[in-house]
Amino acid sequence: MATSCTPAINLPRLSHHQKPVSATVNIDRSLLLQLDQCSDFSQLKQIHARMLRIGLFDDPYSASKLIQAAALSHFSSIEYAQKVFDRIPHPNLYSWNALIRSYASSQEPINALLIFIKMLCESDELPNKFTYPFLIKASALLSALPVGKGLHGMVLKSEFGSDLFVLNSLIHFYAECGCFDMAYRVFLSMQKRDVVSWNSMIMGFAQGGYTEESLDLFRRMEGENVKPNDVTMIGVLSACAKKLDLELGRSMHLYIRRNGIKETLILNNAILDMYTKCGSREDAKRLFDEMEEKDIISWTTIIVGYTRAGDFNAARSVFRTMPYQDIAAWNALISAYVQNGNPKEALATFNELQLRKKAKPDAVTLVCALSACAQLGAMDLGGWIHVYIKKHGIKLNCHLTTALIDMYSKGGALEKALEVFHSVESRDVFVWSAMIAGYAMHGCGRDAIDLFLKMQEAKVRPNSVTFTNLLSACSHSGLVDSGRDFFNQMEPVFGVVPGIKHYACLVDILGRAGNLEEAVDVIENMPISPGASVWGALLGACKLHGRVDIAERACSNLLELEPQNDGAYVLLSNIYAKSGRWDKVSELRKLMRNYGLKKEPGCSSIEVNGNVYEFLVGDNAHPLSKNIYLKLDEIASRLKSIGYVPMKSQLLQLVEEEDVQEQALNLHSEKLAIAFGLISTSPSQPIRIVKNLRVCDDCHAVAKLISKLYNREILLRDCYRFHHFKEGSCSCMDYW
């Protein structure tokens, strides 16, 4: 919706400065009337042809009328308008403005600025109060702050420095570019303000996250007796939604009705959006049912509202009752499943979309589907999507490129991720960061650092995500000095203030390497309060190095922040068991029972022939369960023949009965998935497994042995990183 007023452009009258058309030329003025009434492009071309035959095109006023019809009518063609314009010997200012205005609203707004430069260089015409708003609009669309500032300077030097339309467009421009202080300075400098001035500032503050400023301005607007309209209330509701202030949002809804503000479709959609973001399904549903007019935004908003609340059945029900399910609605549902950790449902919905063939997937659909594939490790389907992109000639924008790199990296195909990375010319910070993350999760720390250095050579500025991925790469590869150096360079060199995730990575880097005292020192001197991830990183490091004293402190702080964190109990229990402190193990088990906590069950998934199969501990739900357990028995027998001894210490904190310890170890989800992979895939195929938890020491040792005994490559992704098992060894070098 517009927040700046678009001034009407009045056609110029013939002035005494313009050369009159020769009397010998038969000027059919009725043609100009026909131009005003022209309803389609073919009719326009006929009028143009007649104007050329009778010489009317040489008249600047008549030519400007033709430009107006070609550039600004509902059937306009900017290409045709440009060709017409190029044939005008001496275009008047109205013709220049019409072309600038058309380009400012096009897919290529930069052309509006180029036409303006051409006007300054090749014409005697000077910009007027109708020229500047469209140039400033083009600058806003391009986020071209220096250009907009230059135009602002030209305005101040001209006679239009106090023009209401021009100043309103400047407020909108600065807000769009995130320069809220400049927008507010322009607003305060205005001698006269209309409702558009207030709306532009209120909306700008709201969209920029300055919710209190936006609401304060609304109150000031009322105090100055400026009557708010529907656009005002859209800005105010946006601020309420960002604040998650349901009560204030309700009061604004009541304010709209009490003050007779016209409840347009766009305004109702804004109210609906506010209710869904503030978590009130009841208010949202009531309004949705009351709305006489609904569009795709209304339907998708209510769908998203239900999915945010976790009510996917209601979301599905609304989706089924939609009069027309366009791609935006499908995207809303697929995206909601992905964002709520339901990748299987997301892909099922994506497959349903493909089967129905009523809407065509767009770039957003494919990004969501690829994200679901990445979560599941479903590389067959992810590869199919990549082929689909190529087959349909879909341009790889940065979002799609990032999603493909992420999918291949998390699917275990680092080489394919690199192919995608090197195949594109345009790489933003997220594309670079995704590739660094790919290296990190595969334990290729040196490669991640090399890529980071190339990123700097490419003049791409790293952001917070880049450093999280880079520090993770250092952690997984034991590059302590590099990790410490990069962390220390973040703010002074790159202007990125370290956050909780970065401190957690640094603690992990130091802790994994055994520098636990230094890790504790980092935590004690943090300028921000340590979060759960920081204490969790320290606790994990204590398990590796058996430091009970520090582990108890880390666990205590972690549970203070997250009392229901079952993983913290399990980790400390592991540490106690490793040091032989069984009394403490028993105490922790009792505490977990008293608090009703249970260890999160291990779940491993494997993709075979495009289908993803999930296994839990001791799972027997698979149709081939009998064959899987026969294979497990075979594996156990072969392992014993080469001297393998189960690491029962892995279960001492959870399984008390000695006779079931070995059996429980043998039923871990990743072992079931590996057995299924051995009987379901060809020997030449790698077995790709995704696990929700950290792989245990015993499963890690078994996977190494299986890779040698069966001559199979096993790619196992746990919640921390990838493990490439091949010929009896793992890519992590037992450092994970």
Image (cartoon, grey):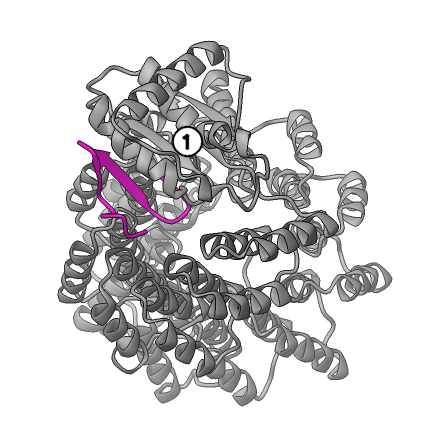
> Circle 1 is placed at which residue position?
670
Numbered marks: total: 1
Residue 308 relative to residue 41: left or right? right
Q: Is residue 399 left or right of residue 566?
A: left
Residue at 33 percent of width and 39 percent of height: 700
Tell me the chief SS of the magenta region: loop
Compared to 678, does 259 lie above or below?
below
| Quarter that holds the N terminus | bottom right
Q: What amino acid is labelled 1 in the image?
A: Glu
Confirm whether residue 642 shows in the render.
yes
Quarter of image, res 148 = bottom left
Above or below 665: residue 561: below
Residue visible at 60% across and 84% down in the picture: 192
Q: Position of residue 9 (x, y in %)?
A: 46, 63
Classify mark 1: helix, strand or loop. helix
Tell which of 460 and 599 is nearer to you: 599
Tell me the residue at 60%/51% (across/down): 566
Image coordinates for residue 499, horizontal then vertical, percent: 43, 71
Whether 704 is drawn above or below 20: the answer is above
The percent coordinates of residue 458 (x first, y second) are 15, 63
Q: Quadrant of residue 307?
A: top right
- Magenta stretch: includes residue 560: no
Residue 267 visible here: no
The part of the chain drawn in magenta is: 717-736
Q: From the viewer's perspective, tell me whether residue 655 is left or right of residue 135.
A: right
Relative to the observer, which residue lies in front, 614 or 336? 614
